Image (cartoon, rainbow, N blue to C red):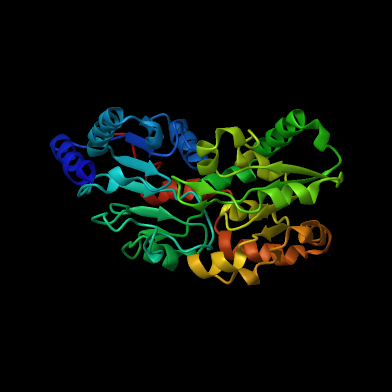
């Protein structure tokens, strides 16, 4: 908090004495050491224009020593104070550390779509009590996947009316790119040739507990359920928070976004990966042994029982549920589900966002 509310604002104020640098675009993230998938499409489109000075500032803060982190933050704040555009895609506290100058446009390309678990200021333990100020301050545009998400995200992140817009999510444009889809399938079957002629089942749960001490529920039941069922090829993709803390439990090395196009059925619990996956109108199963406890403790924006799927709490019922969803689920129900949660994700979100903030319409000076 000392860094957030004292040092960073001081650095920003000093650097903001200079004019904004027209054409300076910054992509920043505090959870990854490279540009996250959620920002890659936007980065590529802006780069293709050939008239912007693009800076990438992505580091996993959890891995940085204090001194190195402080140096990184100072560098970012100096860029932030001069940037015309700043793009983020997750919680990123430095952006909210001070009063931003009006000439800088901050765009939050939020990394998940749809409506599921309560979060942000709608979830009591999501924002630490000791945090002063709004964690989500200074956003000029927060992009969401569909109209029903607008009022929810406005409340969740305490945004002013008009900041949250149903533009669609930039990263989902990739799921409409035929070359991307073909490459995903080619890479998957080159890596996993034994999956040929089988139904690919992706197990992608979220974690329990905190990011600092994450745990899993249900993995052992999944392993037991698929033993001896050779018609399926099971792929496990565990949450990044869990993998970081459990290096001996790393799951499939292929990124989640490259697994979704080849997946025939997704098994998840309460992970927002479900909404990226629903773009493909393919079936899914919700498996959560702690379903009743989780529902009562966490809170949800929607009634998960209305989802077009089978909810499984007992590991012995997993295979029956998988077969039922694969062969009996009506595609019309999946299409309706996609339209509600991801209705604006049509492959054109990135262009819409760019046009909304004027980034591709500006005439050369």
* Relative image position of residue 141 (x, y in whole percent): 37, 53
* Point 71% across, 63% down: residue: 312
* Relative image position of residue 325 (x, y in whole percent): 78, 60
**Left or right side of 227 for 181:** left
Residue 224 in sight from this viewpoint: yes
**Left or right side of 64 for 174:** right
The image shows a total of numbered marks equal to 0
- Residue 131 occupies which quadrant of the picture? bottom left
Is residue 27 or residue 250 the one in the foreground?
250
Q: Is residue 294 above or below residue 236?
A: below
* Relative image position of residue 232 (x, y in whole percent): 82, 46
Is residue 220 or residue 151 the one in the foreground?
220
* Point 40% across, 54% down: residue: 142
**Left or right side of 49 for 138:** left
Image quadrant containing the C terminus: top left
* Point 39% across, 60% down: residue: 125
Residue 299 in sight from this viewpoint: no
Is residue 309 or residue 13 the one in the foreground?
309
Q: In this view, does 234 lie above or below 190?
A: below
* Point 61% across, 53% down: residue: 217
* Relative image position of residue 273 (x, y in whole percent): 59, 51
């Amino acid at each position: 908090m000392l860094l957030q509310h004292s040092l960073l604002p001081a650095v920003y104020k000093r650097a903001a004495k200079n004019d904004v640098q027209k054409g300076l675009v910054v992509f920043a993230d505090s959870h990854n050491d490279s540009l996250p998938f959620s920002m890659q499409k936007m980065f590529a489109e802006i780069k293709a224009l050939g008239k912007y000075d693009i800076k990438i500032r992505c580091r996993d803060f959890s891995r940085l020593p204090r001194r190195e982190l402080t140096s990184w933050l100072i560098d970012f704040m100096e860029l932030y104070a001069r940037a015309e555009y700043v793009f983020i895609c997750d919680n990123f506290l430095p952006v909210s550390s001070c009063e931003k100058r009006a000439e800088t446009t901050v765009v939050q390309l939020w990394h998940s779509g749809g409506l599921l678990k309560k979060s942000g200021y709608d979830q009591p333990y999501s924002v630490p009590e000791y945090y002063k100020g709004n964690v989500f301050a200074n956003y000029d545009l927060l992009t969401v996947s569909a109209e029903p998400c607008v009022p929810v995200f406005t409340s969740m992140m305490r945004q002013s009316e008009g900041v949250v817009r149903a533009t669609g999510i930039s990263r989902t444009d990739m799921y409409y790119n035929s070359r991307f889809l073909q490459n995903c399938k080619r890479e998957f079957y080159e890596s996993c040739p034994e999956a040929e002629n089988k139904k690919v089942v992706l197990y992608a749960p979220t974690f329990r507990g905190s990011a600092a001490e994450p745990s899993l529920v249900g993995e052992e039941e999944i392993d037991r359920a698929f033993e001896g069922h050779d018609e399926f090829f099971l792929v496990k993709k565990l949450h990044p928070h869990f993998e970081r803390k459990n290096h001996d439990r790393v799951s499939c090395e292929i990124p989640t976004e490259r697994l979704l196009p080849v997946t025939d059925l997704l098994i998840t619990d309460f992970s927002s990966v479900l909404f990226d996956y629903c773009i493909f109108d393919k079936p899914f199963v919700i498996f959560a042994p702690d379903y009743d406890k989780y529902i009562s403790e966490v809170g949800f924006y929607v009634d998960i029982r209305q989802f077009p799927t089978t909810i499984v709490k007992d590991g012995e019922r997993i295979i029956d549920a998988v077969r039922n969803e694969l062969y009996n689920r009506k595609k019309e129900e999946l299409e309706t589900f996609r339209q509600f949660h991801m209705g604006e994700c049509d492959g054109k979100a990135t262009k819409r966002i760019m046009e909304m903030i004027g980034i591709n319409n500006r005439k050369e000076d």
